[in-house]
Image: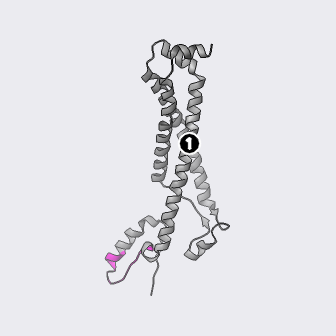
């Protein structure tokens, strides 16, 4: 005879199983991973797919930040040349672009986190109907309506990845300021 115990938090299934094993040593207790390795494989593949999508989004983010910061550098070539001509060294002009990117990232991050939190909370209550795409999910006992959840750990990882991507993508535009010849930069836009 089988008895199934359901939990709202799959990450605690191992903890609950070990507690039950201590309490009922004469009963064979298995977690969902041991009972259904194919379902575990599906969840692992979903995690890999999620990270692949995140990498694609981060790559797009990197290119858009490079484009934005390059435009900022090109539009201010004369001003940057003027700063270099009056004595600002290369390291400071490099730092100027890096700091600008840092502050833009820090200003936009709370807005992005808030918008994503509101979106996730909405879909966490209403659900996302995947019945048109995932007819076979019911064979594994899974619902075709998905209720997304984003833990604090994911939020912190995503925030860190975006911040690092922003700073890394600002290196090339900031490097372009190092190659500025002050005289040519001032003349170019006269």
- Local secondary structure at mark 1: helix
Q: x%, y% of residue 17?
A: 38, 73
Above or below 100: residue 120? below
Magenta span covers which residues?
A: 20-32
Q: x%, y% of residue 115?
A: 59, 46
- Location of the N terminus (image quadrant): bottom left
Magenta stretch holds residue 30: yes
Q: x%, y% of residue 47?
A: 50, 60
User: Looking at the magenta stretch, what is its main secondary structure?
Assistant: loop
Q: Which residue lies furthest to the right in this view?
A: 132
Above or below 9: residue 29? below
Q: Which residue is drawn at 50% across and 59% down?
A: 48
Q: Residue at x 68, y 67 (%)?
A: 132
Q: Which residue is drawn at 45% across and 82% down?
A: 3
Which is nearer the eye, 190 or 121?
A: 190
Quadrant hosting residue 141: bottom right
Quick check: can you spot residue 100?
Answer: no
Q: In the picture provided, is 17 more to the left or to the right than 171?
A: left
The image's colouring method is one colour
Circle 1 residue: 61
Dot 1, crowdedness within 10 Å: few (<14), some or many (≥20)?
A: some
Q: In the picture provided, is 5 more to the left or to the right than 19?
A: right
- Location of the C terminus (image quadrant): top right
Q: x%, y% of residue 42?
A: 51, 68
């Amino acid at each position: 005879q089988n008895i199934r115990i359901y939990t709202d938090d799959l990450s605690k299934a191992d903890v609950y199983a070990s507690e039950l094993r201590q309490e009922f040593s004469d009963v064979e207790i298995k977690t969902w991973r041991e009972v259904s390795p194919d379902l575990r494989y599906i969840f692992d593949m979903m995690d890999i797919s999620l990270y692949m999508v995140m990498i694609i989004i981060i790559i797009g983010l990197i290119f858009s930040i490079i484009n934005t910061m390059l435009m900022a550098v090109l539009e201010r070539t004369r001003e940057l040349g003027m700063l270099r001509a009056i004595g600002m060294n290369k390291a400071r002009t490099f730092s100027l672009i890096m700091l600008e990117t840092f502050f833009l990232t820090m200003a936009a991050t709370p807005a992005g986190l808030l918008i994503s939190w509101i979106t996730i909370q909405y879909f966490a209550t209403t659900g996302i109907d995947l019945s048109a795409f995932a007819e076979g999910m019911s064979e594994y006992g899974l619902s075709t309506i998905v209720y997304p959840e984003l833990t604090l750990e994911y939020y912190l990882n995503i925030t860190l990845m975006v911040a690092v991507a922003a700073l890394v993508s600002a290196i090339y535009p900031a490097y372009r300021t190092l190659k500025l010849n002050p005289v040519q930069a001032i003349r170019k836009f006269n």
